[in-house]
Image: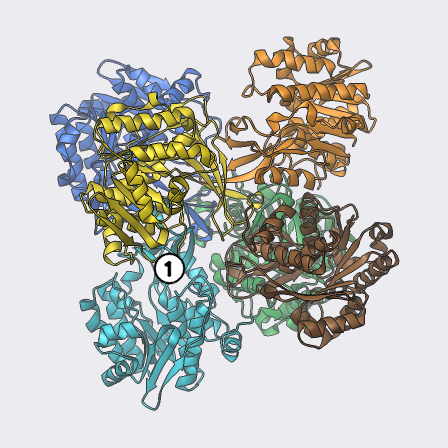
Chain colours: A orange, B yellow, C cyan, D blue, E green, F brown
Amino acid sequence: MEVVTFGESMVLFYPDATGPLRYATSFRKTIAGAESNVAIAMARLGHSVGWFSKLGEDEFGRYILSVIRGEGVDVSRVLTDSNRNTGLLFKERFGFSNPNIYYYRKDSAASRLSPEDLDASYISKAKVLHITGITPALSTPAQEAVFEAIRIAKENNVIVSFDPNIRLKLWDIETAKPVLLEIASKADILLIGEDEGELLAGTNGPEELAKTFMSMGCTTVVVKLGKRGCYVENTDTKDYIEGYLIEKVEDTVGAGDGFAAGFLSGILRGLSLQEAAEYGNGVGAMATLVSGDMEGFPTYNQLMTFIGKRGYIDR
Amino acid sequence: MEVVTFGESMVLFYPDATGPLRYATSFRKTIAGAESNVAIAMARLGHSVGWFSKLGEDEFGRYILSVIRGEGVDVSRVLTDSNRNTGLLFKERFGFSNPNIYYYRKDSAASRLSPEDLDASYISKAKVLHITGITPALSTPAQEAVFEAIRIAKENNVIVSFDPNIRLKLWDIETAKPVLLEIASKADILLIGEDEGELLAGTNGPEELAKTFMSMGCTTVVVKLGKRGCYVENTDTKDYIEGYLIEKVEDTVGAGDGFAAGFLSGILRGLSLQEAAEYGNGVGAMATLVSGDMEGFPTYNQLMTFIGKRGYIDR
Amino acid sequence: MEVVTFGESMVLFYPDATGPLRYATSFRKTIAGAESNVAIAMARLGHSVGWFSKLGEDEFGRYILSVIRGEGVDVSRVLTDSNRNTGLLFKERFGFSNPNIYYYRKDSAASRLSPEDLDASYISKAKVLHITGITPALSTPAQEAVFEAIRIAKENNVIVSFDPNIRLKLWDIETAKPVLLEIASKADILLIGEDEGELLAGTNGPEELAKTFMSMGCTTVVVKLGKRGCYVENTDTKDYIEGYLIEKVEDTVGAGDGFAAGFLSGILRGLSLQEAAEYGNGVGAMATLVSGDMEGFPTYNQLMTFIGKRGYIDR
Amino acid sequence: MEVVTFGESMVLFYPDATGPLRYATSFRKTIAGAESNVAIAMARLGHSVGWFSKLGEDEFGRYILSVIRGEGVDVSRVLTDSNRNTGLLFKERFGFSNPNIYYYRKDSAASRLSPEDLDASYISKAKVLHITGITPALSTPAQEAVFEAIRIAKENNVIVSFDPNIRLKLWDIETAKPVLLEIASKADILLIGEDEGELLAGTNGPEELAKTFMSMGCTTVVVKLGKRGCYVENTDTKDYIEGYLIEKVEDTVGAGDGFAAGFLSGILRGLSLQEAAEYGNGVGAMATLVSGDMEGFPTYNQLMTFIGKRGYIDR
Amino acid sequence: MEVVTFGESMVLFYPDATGPLRYATSFRKTIAGAESNVAIAMARLGHSVGWFSKLGEDEFGRYILSVIRGEGVDVSRVLTDSNRNTGLLFKERFGFSNPNIYYYRKDSAASRLSPEDLDASYISKAKVLHITGITPALSTPAQEAVFEAIRIAKENNVIVSFDPNIRLKLWDIETAKPVLLEIASKADILLIGEDEGELLAGTNGPEELAKTFMSMGCTTVVVKLGKRGCYVENTDTKDYIEGYLIEKVEDTVGAGDGFAAGFLSGILRGLSLQEAAEYGNGVGAMATLVSGDMEGFPTYNQLMTFIGKRGYIDR
Amino acid sequence: MEVVTFGESMVLFYPDATGPLRYATSFRKTIAGAESNVAIAMARLGHSVGWFSKLGEDEFGRYILSVIRGEGVDVSRVLTDSNRNTGLLFKERFGFSNPNIYYYRKDSAASRLSPEDLDASYISKAKVLHITGITPALSTPAQEAVFEAIRIAKENNVIVSFDPNIRLKLWDIETAKPVLLEIASKADILLIGEDEGELLAGTNGPEELAKTFMSMGCTTVVVKLGKRGCYVENTDTKDYIEGYLIEKVEDTVGAGDGFAAGFLSGILRGLSLQEAAEYGNGVGAMATLVSGDMEGFPTYNQLMTFIGKRGYIDR
């Protein structure tokens, strides 16, 4: 596998209408999961990608497995836990702000991911290990698994990519901060939103943030600036890369994961930091064109067309 | 209130089609709960009924509250727990047998019901307290709440009605048996399925079962025999009461709760044991005519018509 | 036009599930109307048919018009009333008996049909005028329109066909009886259900009924016997014609209208009474194979295949 | 009850798509009714509220009853009429303007509300009686019921609140005007839209309108100015209270009823006229955030958050 | 018939959500066809219109027939081909641009339309024959049928109206250009989009385009300018006619066909070129107010209201 | 791969209701394909399976690919054709007989499968090559591909399994017969329905059929007898194996493919002919319990439970 990633994916239930969930009469089912989003996006861009997690031995776990496998991601290392459920979440949309989330993931199968669940040989053969800050929030063993995976990666010269993805519904900032900073300090590539960066680093502005994280040990820092694009910096170069103007955003969920996938794809293809950032901006923008987390991720050809035309997509 | 009952009600999600849940694309939402079913059925029959539980401070809890209140049940004693979710369940139907159930109720708000949650004055003014064997399976405090409620009832000459409703997904039979037998021994009215009875009492046949439970202290025992009707016995009389022939059963879920409601209605109206059993048979049969747990419960007039015509319903 | 008919057609709303209507969340819209059913069935069998009514100047009226016109029925004589609504009905299904009906047709546009709404020249050029007993139940002017149409038909040697279709939700039997008997006495062809016949004629059995109605003036009497088929009698011949065995009846609504259409088609094609009855049995049986009033009516070729194979349909 | 109100509530059918209703294939069912909207909104804000009406003895009436009861409104005084239907309405939406409405409410059960249907003791114990101008448009007895309710209220020092809600589909302005003006002249609190005011009073501008209505006898006049907020005046004070800016209005239906509920809640809580107007603006604005008449009404805590943040809602 | 037109209509399947079609779970069925759109729009405006095509002897063909007939269009000349399917198309919408189209129309029944399928007497009695540039793209015989129909029309002084409707998915521009120019040169009325005109004529700007096409033989040229309206020119007059401002466009599909229908209606009513163009602008604008190709076409009264109020529609 | 199979899979559209397709308003999308059914069923039973075909470069092709891959089937040899569509089919159900099928597969991408599309090395490493009689009906090159695949298999001692699956909508029996007989004569394992066998062999009865086909060269013949089970014969043994009684069959489609998968699984596991037949009967029966072609195929554990309990399934 070129890329390996792991973390919790859940079944996501969407109500049929906006407004308080108690008035919704029916719900559609899909999947959600930051790491599986990145995996799917990269598979669609043509990379070999492995994703793993721990799923309940139930229909929801089987559903998640078949969707991710169906997208062409290697799921050979997925584990199951016969004593725990697959996690769920419900979205409540008001049409004017971010949706409310109702989680049913406490003590889920995935929350029991632990260092023993890692296949060291699988990780060590990858070129990139992608980690998010959601997994260490799930449980102590899950946190240990993250650090063990990073240890294996670094021992084997696998690039460690990290997206903090701060989730304050899962842990408070005081608990999260030291853990996420420690992971960031071990990461080769840090992909971080501007707000997140300020929360973690206590400094302001893309360039200050990059400086701070590079001084901790990161070799590449990408500060995501939403529709404005991103700021990238490594030891050789630094630049602002402008984003794509999307007239009608359908759904911003999945844009950050798409950015990560596009950026890592560029890196794996040996492009410059600026070009990789352009890929990240492109995949992120295209994800917002379609409702749903991962439905809008492009193939490589679609991405090239989009980038080439600066935002016009001809599928 | 003539009747008071309590226990966990959950949001129930139905898939749009039969078959494995992973292939279902959408789900309808309704509510499920043995005690609220009995409460709703009795309210529809014209009784004043109070039901209480502990709900999450979430949209699913608000939904359950408004549905049960909408059916005319007093919900003034319902409590909420801001730290726990309202429980959920999913049904998987194959069209040829009982549905599979997937629970998301572990550590739910309702599982934290405890003796302190009881309003002694509310219970003590009721004529009947109806208890099921599901509540003591939820947690130790919930079990204590059941025994405390029974204590309050007995101290105030409130009739204690008990339906064991054995749920082997929630506890194993070894754990369940002594608890359920202890509750049964304190109950005035025991409503029990023949299979359940054999599991608990270790004896066979309606009459043997009645004998066993009456020797434990019950004053009235009703052994439910499915479509064959029921066997009733108290210190004065005993009888088999034939059931209603339903040509096209839509859904048997709710039939047992309907039976309990019909029987208790008869008792509250001062009818003979045989007549009360007839009411129980009638409401149970009518529940099977309609898909859904509680949609098929009749009004008093509908029940009279149904019983009068021995199974023909003219709504 | 070979056939002219008129009467009220309404928008019919079907709930998405069986059970009490208050629990239904959504409703599908279609149309209902005994006379338009006959018209559509005959158009599908290849006859030129005209149907008229009075519709509200509203979207529901426009809907009815386009559906019936879309089926190939001439609607050039349809009128509108800008002060009254198009009638509606809702069906409540329990899966075990006939549905409950909720009408919203009181003082509807169609209930104001009156003798002035008749185009005498249109009726007088038809070969058959088909009348049902629903129209005279709608209002006094509608009743007068029925008698006037019959008068025009008889004056011009147009065959008058009559199906009483007794609707006790619209009028009581005391009011209905003399009116329906008067119409029957003026009809050339009477198509009547056995139960209806007994209600109107006070006699029992197909042969007695035929005798009674022929003594009133009918030249042809068809007593419909449900799945057993029918009994036919005219001045020359009489016979029982066996029905078709349908293993899985989807919906019996529309079967009577289908029978009428099939029988009249046979008559218009110059077939024997027995053959026309066979056509009636066939179209009626085929209507029950499909849910919905008129979706199951066959083309002539389909009917021939069905009859030829005694019940097997190869569409 | 702190508040008592009464009037017609109907079952509302929404098409599944925008455009002419004849092309809609399915319809969702919900309820509509200005007075029940106010009752539900006030119950959600924490007040004890009673609403009554006359419903058909049909499934649609039972549905309305359970929804309103489910929202926590006292429905103990609701009556039924076994000879009349519950009223219906259909909405046709074009996405660019107010929806078209198709009523099926002529001679409905609620239109037969009459003075005898009033429970004088129930009204006399309330703090506020809320009346709309829809009820007197339904029929002569309904109009008499309105005047009788006002008489009872005034005799018992119950505050009379009045929202004209002019419905020109139910009566013409010539008929409506004297009736509505007479009610207005008897009301303590008049809540009126600017356009409505001009139609009734023949004067222009909020201040002129307030002057006119106060000279008729009102003690408090609130002129609603849509998104601009409102103008309030009583014998002590007068003020313009700015409205909330809502970026993405989902549905304005229910905003006026929400305003009334918020304003009356403020009055009942003993707030200043300005503060009560702020509550009215807040509830009205929040109603527009959610599709549906009453789904968007806030709890007291939600309202406080919304007002505190001048428009930002954290549910 | 005042107007005769012909061409392929297909069953159109809409996914239930935006985004790539492979994620859509269900599809709604409707019809699509430029010529049938014009026919339906003109029928709704009060003209007698005939449309014909060749349909498969299948359910999809029967569906198309009943929809178009239901709209009041004469379909008496429609033919069927028992060896070929009715064509289909699927739309994939992204919410930000024109939908992608997936055709299943190769070798469809309609693609086999040929000169022998024309009823010369039917065409020769019309006032207007309306042709689109889609039909000649379907096959050689279909192209021949177009030229033969034009020949018949011209021989009988029937006005030939032509809308090129260039479809580059069906043929390439090199093949299309000479054919469409030849048809244009024979047309009396040419209705052409500005972009299309440039593609065909190689000149720019409405006036240049009109000049070019009039020099080829057209007597009336209408250059459609989208929301800006249109430019019209004939031998007597020329003018720019401003379009209608539509705040919220639901769907632009059908606007061009609506324009054609409105314009031809004006011509048939004997209006000036400017007035006819105003009608065209009006019907085209109204089509965009409603999702769906033909649901938004107005009646004559609705068009008059819309035009009279310069864009405000009161249905 | 243990098993390799290939053939056309199509997108299947199901109407939302029974009855003629022209009245259906919406359609659900799933996939259909005899060979992919077998592949999915065997993957679920725990075998490594490869399936290939030629898909259009369109969304429907991508959908088929992700579903089959999601089920755990190797799709690495699937090809695409950028000039042809992926095939479609529509089902029309009447609830009383087999559904009508409307194909849109003429000249589809899969119909162009040809010998050059075969990866000889992929086939030669399999233990079983499974072929159906549908592929040779698609086109001459597809037929050649079948014979070439068989040649490769036999050259490499890969067992050839053949299910004729006669489709008279694709070719007539005269054309089909010699081709299918030639394939049968080359097959090691022939799985054939009794009716099919009689059509091909011209003899009657399971034993006669087996004799005939074995004399042609088959080493194992399985005659499928529907719910009665099957007759199996090879050079060593022969037997009737009784089928499973299914009380409520949901859908028989997929049962034959399930039988093939179960039987081949038994053979691959080295079981006796009788045991393999039992597996076949089991999987076939379980497929009928669930609506949909492949949703009902069991895992190995589910199959064991089903067989162990002779028809009772505990999922």
> Considering only vertical position in the picture, is C112 above or below D13?
below
Which chain is mark 1 on?
Answer: B
**Label 1, on which residue?**
B247
- Image coordinates of residue A216 in percent, x first then y, are 73, 9
Element under disc 1: loop
| Closer to us: B219 or F149 | B219
| Closer to us: F186 or D31 | F186
Left or right of D89? Residue B98 is: right
- Image coordinates of residue F75 in percent, x first then y, are 75, 46
Q: How many marks?
A: 1
> Considering only vertical position in the picture, is D143 above or below C29?
above
- Image coordinates of residue C263 in percent, x first then y, are 40, 78
Q: Is residue D56 visible?
A: yes
Q: Residue furthest bottom?
A: C236
Q: Residue furthest right?
A: F155
Left or right of A208? Residue D167 is: left
Q: Quadrant of residue F155?
A: bottom right
Give the amino acid at mark 1.
Glu
